[in-house]
Image (cartoon, coloured by chain):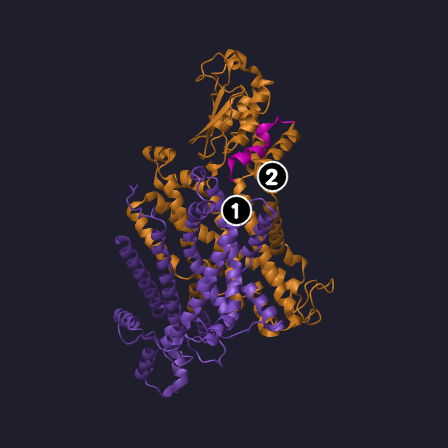
Chain colours: A orange, B purple
Amino acid sequence: MSPTDGESPDDSETTTDREPTPQGDREDRALDAIAGNDDAIDPETVTGVDRSVTGGERESGSPAISGHDHTGRAPAVGDATDGSPAVRSDGGEGSDGARTSSELRSDGGTRSEGNVSEFEQMADVTLSKNERRRQWFDEKILAPARIVWDDWRARFGLVVVTVYLFMGLVGPRLVAAPSPNQGPRLLGAFRTLEYPFGTTASGVDILSQLVYATPAMLLMITAGAVFTVALGTATGTLAGYKGGRVDSVLMTITDVMMTIPGLPLTIVLAAVLEIEGNPIVIGVLITINAWAGLARAIRSQVLTLRDAEYVEASRIMGIGTPKIIASDIVPNLMPYITMNFVRQARAVIFGAVGLYFLGVLPYNSNNWGVMMNAAVNRAGATSSPAAFHWLLVPMVTIIVLALGLTLLAQGADRVFNPRVRARHAKTVESDDDGDEEGGTGGTTTAATGGL
Amino acid sequence: MKYFVKRLGQSVFTIFAVVSFSFALIRLLPGGPMDYLRAQIMEQGGSSLSPEAINRRIEAQSGINPDEPVYLQYVDYMVGLVQGDLGQSVWYGDPVTSIIGPAIPWTVFLTASALFLAFTVGVSLGALMAYKEGSKFDVGSTGVGLVLNSTPGYVVALLLVAYLGYRYNVFPTGGRYNSAIDPGFTLPFLRSVLYHGAMPIASMAIVGFGGWALSMRGNSIRVLGEDYLRVARLRGLSTRRIALRYVARNAILPMYTGLMIAIGTVFGGAVIIENIFAYPGVGFYLVKSISARDYPLMMGGFILITVAMVIGITIADLTYGWLDPRAKGGASRESY
């Protein structure tokens, strides 16, 4: 889904709801809508502010504020019917739009005396370093966090992923290492507090095995997902943007890779290459040809972007292909790429655990798939109810993590929507001391106007 | 027609690339399968075998004669494959073709039925969800779909084996058919095949249909909001015609490409599923060859799985142009 196909009523709501009261405030509401362009702001480079709006004009109608949205998405069109300012953001490079916003906000009261030409006007208020840092923090980190927290799916996903990260990073320091005869043999799950998930046939604590397997699994998942997404994005964008011979060569390779069945290829490579059980290598091996599908999908998205005006402008200006791809094309695909990162992470879990369960991958530490393998092959967990918990615990672990990742991906989609994000950025909306009210206002709008 | 030829050529090229790649894997890796094969033969025959005899055995098993220069080995290997010679299994002692060949239809049977079942159930459910958008049914099904979409097939397979197989003895836990029945086109045999295939197919289909349902739901909702649908209603077309010709067709088309990727996923997943159910398909032999270090069998299995998948994807790809007349080769773009 492309970010532009949402409707703009949400924005006009934010921009036009209010009666035209004190002008500073009025503009604040309007400027919300262009807060999506939270690019790095460098006040030193910004000198001029739109001064065409003098007292008389303001009475008669709506001052037009035009901001430049860096990524070229989200045309936030304010509804000018009730005399509130129309905000227009044109796709294009440049970060002075956001700059304009903070300038206009802070000097709202003094503008009537501005009779200087708009080209000569200097900004008369600057932000201190500290303020700037706070603004950056708010727009870059707090606003996305608030958006994610707003959506129950994303919240669930975030909690799940955090728990697993905690389990992987801190867990091994809190739980005793797994060793034989830690406890009674084949104790069921949820029987004692000491061994909450029960024990294996040789008396190893299952919880401890689970926790100690997590770091390697996380490493494997990250390696596989990063590999796939990096290679898939690079190939897809290059092929789609360049076209011609580059495209046909890259796509032929991609098509060949795509038609090779992934898991059998991994099995064969693992057997022939005699690799060690390094989780990073295994992670890459499992997704060895998954990048091809992603490259194909990204290419078809790039085909719709390559002839956009701002890309054409960059091309005419003589900017090189890598730069155009990196700053004009890829930002537009970020939501899609993030979704695929999470999807690949899930695929790595499924594939790795499945192959470890079959016993065809080398390993040098315990992991969830090896646990399942041991449960079935050593204790016959499928046929004997006494050992069933040994199999069930790692299976539930996988499903919960996969579900968390899926939901997180759905929620992450909203973070990249500039309109949703604008509503969650406090700094643009409220004055320095009125943080609370601004925040609550933002959250309520976002709750109703979802995707 | 031109596209047809081009697409077929590409499939042949893919198979050629995979075969060459597998040759490189066996032959060119130092300390790889060839050295291992040699060690295996020397162990079996003791020191009594002359180097020539060993090489002859290697050639019989892998289809590669280590005496010849590499390019000749490559040509021999390719010619052998075209003639259907995949070498000889070390473990079983039979030609690989006679082991894997009969297993292929069974794997295709499992994967094709699972894919078909998941797709049809998923699409119907998704369409229903879209028409009842926002209802309890929709919310509930979306939740179920999400959970199923986050479950790997082998988890369902293990649960099915444990409960329906061992605990309640509803379905058999292994085999392709009841060995007491003579294979043939008879009713009892076909019933036995379905009975044995039910759990493997179910475990692949159950985890698949959630994803199809969710994407069908999304697509249908998008199509339901299109202007041409309003026009169709204003023209007074029958609901049935609108639902099938306008909504269903336009909602399913984007999913058809997903079907091609799904073929790969299902084929890969079948390797694990076949082992859980001890179902002697290609994947079953592939894993067996790994544990027995039977390289000729492994490579043969891998090549045949790939060929089966290439054929499946080619069929899906070629029928797409027939389903969606708008799909044309788009290679006429300006290049930058």
Magenta extent: A416-433
Q: Does the magenta stretch include residue A422?
A: yes
Mark 1, residue position: B130
Asked if disc 2 and disc 1 are in contact, CB closer than 8 Å, the reply is no
If the image is split into quadrants, where does the C terminus of chain A sit? top right
On screen, residue B173 above or below A56: below
Is B147 magenta? The answer is: no
In the displayed structure, would residue B216 be above or below residue A364? above
| Residue A318 position within the rendered picture, expressed as x and y whole percent measured from the top left | 32, 35
Q: In which quarter of the image is residue A430?
A: top right
Q: Residue at x 52, y 66 (%)?
A: A356
Question: Mark 2: few, some, or many residues within 10 Å (few <14, many ≥20)?
Answer: many
**Which residue lies under the disc numbered 2?**
A146
- Name, please, the residue furthest toward the bottom: B48
**Which of label 2 and label 1 is nearer to you?**
1
- At 36% from the left and 39% from the top, the residue drawn is A306
- Residue A366, located in which quarter of the rendered image? bottom right
Q: Mark 1 lies on which chain?
A: B
Q: Which of A336 and A95 is in front in this view?
A: A336
Image point 37% across, 77% down: which residue? B98
Q: Where is residue A55 in the image (x, y as percent from the top left)?
A: 52, 12
Is any atom of residue A363 visible in this view?
A: no
Q: Give the prevailing secondary structure in the magenta stretch.
A: helix
Front one among A61 and A56: A61
Q: Can residue B218 be seen in this view?
A: yes
Distance of label 2 from label 1 (alpha carbons): 30 Å
